[in-house]
Image (cartoon, grey):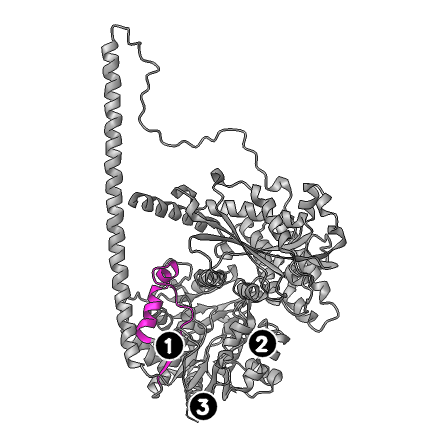
Amino acid sequence: MTDVQDEIRRLYACDEERYRKSHVPEIDSASQTQIGATLTYFAHSLEKGLSSDNFETGRGFTAVQALIDRLNIYKAKGYDTDNLAYVNALSVLHVFHDRHKNTETLQELEMILGGFKEEISQTTNGIGGSSVVSKKSKKDNSKKNFKELAEERFSIRSYSDKSVAKEDILDAIAMAAKTPTVCNRQGVRVYVSYNKDVIRAALKIQGGLDHYDAPPVLLLVTSDDSVYTSPNERNQGFIDGGLYAMSVLYALEYKGLAACPLNAMFGQKQDAAIRKTLTLPEGEKLITFISVGHFKDENNICKSFRFPVDEIVFERNSIGTEMIPATVTMDIGAQETPQSPKSDHFMDAIRKKVRIRTRLTEAGQVARKKIRIRTRVRAAKAFVLLKKRELTRSGQRAKLSAEYQSPEGVIITLNDYANYGNMIQRYALQHFLAKSGHKFISYDHGIPVEGSDKDTKTQYLTEFADRYMPRKDYEPHDEYSVYIVGSDQVWRNWWYKDIRKTLGFFFFNFLGNKKVKRIAYAASFGKDTLREADIGSDFVDYARPLVKEFDAISVRERSGAAIMKKTWNVHAELVSDPTMLLESDDYDQIIRQSLQPLTPAEGIFTYIIAETEENTYIVSQAAAALNIEVGGIKLATEVLPPIEQWLKGIRDAKLVVTDSFHGTVFSIINNTPFIVVENSVGGAARIENLLELFNINKDRLVKKKGAYDFNINQTRPINWGYVNTKLAEMRKQSGDWLLDAIRK
């Protein structure tokens, strides 16, 4: 059994290695195929919006921005602009642009399209976008040949109100029963629900039909791992289940029923939630959901282009030349026959070779045994280290829990254990409140699973949280007297599948009618407008009564205060980021107490979240001009350095180059000269507001368009005297506002 387990572990490690090498990495280092895949992904996201029965202008701009960013990289790398992935992206954007003509959001859209506007307007091939299929065209599906059925099948996400007969569903599944499975193992299972409440609950977890009515029927295809017999069959369930699911889709099309496959590739929490909701066995692989219903008279569809056959078919008509190392064999083809006078020598030679082979086989077995022993020893050592870490972390958390047995309140913010800025702002707010006599814990709804890849990468950041940040998971029955939301971009729609549930959480939708104090501290939308933050009118109306329940609201940017006033007619105080509530001495103490050895800072410390050619140019230009070395922290690493190293690097550098808001904040706190590069994901609004607050000239902010004109020798010096005076004023004003809000 141990050997089988070792083999499974080895094979999954090979699977992981292949996937790591092939999947889309950091977008700036991606191949044409990889970037092309992301172009198709975001273009299809827009197609789904265009094909919605309730298409709303102004939505989807985040996907447009992501698509434009990738088109820029694609062209900058000189990739083939005749490739269909590129052409389709332009075609979809052409349709999207046409939908926004004569609307108030057209100008905003064209600003995002930028230099691609002309190329998009000239792309009239029509391969991307949306179309319509009629119910009438499906009337004779049962008389069509397979080619017609296959070519005319499209995914349909919206259905008529007519119920679907169970007999039709069972008949379609029966048609699919002839789908081959490995050695006729038949491990495929199909779970069917006709109950709208169950369907809504499942799709709420799945998230693929957020803006659609619940379908009349929902299928889930799974594959039972218990029918497979060897480690080599570890992934066979996906193959058998995938084949079966496609057969079901064709059978439904044959019967004139509309359907859409919906992915079931979940993270750990989603997987557990869907298994609980649908009472699914743990030993079954989730393959795909399929929503089913009757066609409407007219049905909007995504065009969903396909690559031609000659781009996906590769002939192999000769044997490969790459050799596998040979084992020792008995080569007797040139030997004399046993009847010859030398037959004894011949047999001796055979016996000798057989003995050699036997010894080599035995040696191989011994070697494999030793390797297994060494592997197990290494695994045991790793296990001991892991358990030691777990005990240390458990002890640290227990110590904090003892100190915070009866907290006054709870802080709700974004949790990202791979983001230094997010981690340090969480620490700063808790630490400031503790120094002021108020013990607050924070909700930890995103901690990585211990022992996972993410935990390995973020182990030092997680251990920092264990040492300094008391926290717990959210539970509906929690009772606290004060709830604080903030800081960070808590009021931005981060592509949430269920915006009311998830973004609403940061507006305290879970508190209901509880008589508790609700405070927003330094909350941020991350963008200048709600539209840029991907928040539509539906959520604005949903959040209106929630906003009215707040006792005190403060925001981090002036644009946020303007949004609150314009949208909900609510005053929001402008305050500093919580990291500025503490002084540089507070962070120096953290550096001194580091449990890990820290390396000295280089002349230039770089902290770049979105690596681009522009960023690289700016760093190299600054290094050459100042004649100093470059160091820093790269996020694309197996293990992120400790937070203490990040703090020390910014504090001790001669110059910081960053595209991070908090990288800029800590440069200001430490009076370290800096250059901040515009980050299209994070947005420039919060950086511009920050520089304006401290009267720092905006030549320190390099926009993408002006990157290659940047010259560090032309930047004006920072008046640190003014900065420190202003920082002290803001620290007092913001701290007083927060403490008053709690104590009122």
Q: Tell me which amino acid carries mark 3.
A: Ala
Q: Residue at x 26, y 22 (%)?
A: 353
Which residue bears the numbered disc 3?
A: 741
Q: Amino acid at mark 1?
A: Tyr
Number of the front mark, 2 or 3: 3
Q: Is residue 312 left or right of residue 17?
A: right
- 71 is within the stretch colored magenta: no
Instruction: Locate the N terminus by quadrant.
Output: top left
Q: Is residue 237 left or right of residue 313?
A: left
- Residue type at mark 2 is Asp
Asked which secondary structure carries label 3, the reply is: helix
Q: Disc 2 or disc 1, which is closer to the eye?
A: 1
Query: Total marks drawn?
Result: 3
Q: Look at the numbered disc 1 and give the secondary structure of its residue.
A: helix
Measure how far apart labels 2 and 3 are at the Cα level: 26 Å
Q: Earlier in the sequence, mark 2 or mark 3?
A: 2
Classify residue 371 as left or right of residue 228. left
- Tag 1 or tag 2, which sits nearer the N-term? 1
Q: Which residues are magenta?
A: 439-468
Count neighbours of disc 3 (C-alpha within 10 A) and say few if under 14, some if 14 to 19, many if 20 or more: some
Residue where numbered disc 2 is placed: 528
Residue 464 counted in the magenta span: yes
Q: Earlier in the sequence, mark 3 or mark 1?
A: 1
